[in-house]
Image: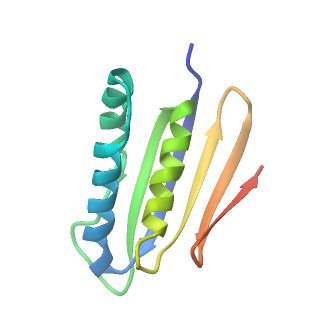
Amino acid sequence: MASYVSIKGWIECSDDDIKIIQENINNFWNNCPFNIEEKESAKIYKSGWVFPTNSFNWSSYIFFGACVKSYFIIYFEKCIKTIMELDIEISGFFELDYYEDNYKVNWKINNGNLIQTTN
């Protein structure tokens, strides 16, 4: 039986950067070397991203929320890191809740770094 992790969080960016982040996420998930079963799961997990359709004030937030198979965490982390490699300014926060192991991991994106803490 697969174990699952609940991921929920957000990326803060400028309105101008939403499209490039969305394209980066789509390219990452479409080109990742998954096997057939993983490809089907990846399509579902990719739909966990929510992008703003209207902008207001000075910041925009891109959200992610999904329960994923635990082995997909490595892909999710790689996806976040590809976004961090873009020539844009972002910050963010994600909580990973490992149900079976009864612990949580927090990822904070700040100044080009992914900082991990555990609860």
Residue at screen point 41% across, 72% down: 86
Residue 13: name its quadrant. bottom left
- Tally of marks: 0
Query: Which residue is most to the front?
Result: 33
Residue situated furthest left in the rendering: 53
* Observer able to see residue 47: no
Q: Position of residue 29 (x, y in %)?
A: 34, 45
Question: Where 57 falls versus 39 (above or below)?
Answer: below
Taking the image as shown, residue 75 lies to the left or right of residue 96, namely left
Task: State the residue lying farthest toward the right.
Answer: 119
Viewer-side residue, 15 vs 114? 114
Is 91 drawn above or below residue 10 in the view shown?
Answer: below
State the residue at coordinates (42%, 52%).
64
**Image quadrant of residue 66?**
top left
Q: Is residue 105 above or below residue 15?
A: above
Q: Is residue 118 above or below residue 84?
A: above
What's the residue at 60%, 74% (across, down)? 110
Task: Give the left or right position of residue 3, taking residue 42 as reference.
Answer: right
The N terminus: image quadrant? top right
Looking at the image, residue 11 sits to the left or right of residue 112; the answer is left
Q: Is residue 33 visible?
A: yes
Residue 111 in percent (x, y) is at 59, 79
**Farthest top residue in view:** 1
- Horizontal and vertical percent position of residue 97: 63, 41
Which residue occupies the foreground of this view, 4 or 112?
112
Q: Position of residue 38 (x, y in %)?
A: 39, 27
Q: Residue at x 56, y 56 (%)?
A: 94
